[in-house]
Amino acid sequence: MSEESGFKILVTNQSNTERIIRAVIAVVLILAYLAIPSSVNNSIALVGLGVAGVLLFNAVSGNCYIYRVLGINTCPLPETQE
């Protein structure tokens, strides 16, 4: 089976700008988790940490499964060779 046929799991569908924004938001959420005392509301803090993990995965891999399901692609198309 060649690489072109089949279902690719990690397909880059995010632009670099969007990846940077997601990484910054993830870092802010992680820092907020560490800075806020755990006595405030632990379940909300853990949800924020989970969201930060998903955003960090999206930023590193360049792949967003929600975008993939909806057919959205913000990654610029490669220039065609003529």
Image: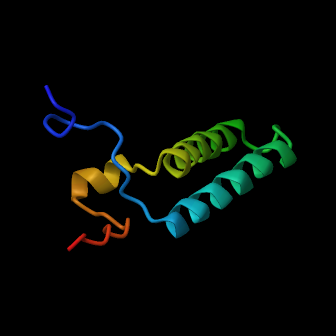
Coordinates of residue 62 in the picture (x, y in percent): 46, 51
Which residue sits at x=73%, y=46%?
30
Q: Quadrant of the N terminus?
A: top left
Which residue sits at x=23%, y=58%?
70
Front position in the image: 68 or 9: 9
Coordinates of residue 47 in the picture (x, y in percent): 59, 41
Which residue sits at x=45%, y=65%?
15
With respect to residue 73, does 11 lie above or below?
A: above
How is this picture coloured? rainbow
Quadrant in which residue 9 is drawn = top left
With respect to residue 77, does 8 lie above or below?
A: above
Front position in the image: 7 or 48: 7
Q: Is residue 12 left or right of residue 29?
A: left
Q: How many marks?
A: 0
Coordinates of residue 66 in the picture (x, y in percent): 33, 51
Q: Is residue 49 left or right of residue 69?
A: right
Q: Quadrant of the C terminus?
A: bottom left
Q: Is residue 12 left or right of residue 8?
A: right
The furthest residue to the top: 1
Which residue sits at x=71%, y=52%?
27
Front position in the image: 75 or 53: 75
The furthest residue to the front: 82
With respect to residue 17, does 62 lie above or below?
A: above
Q: Is residue 43 left or right of residue 81?
A: right
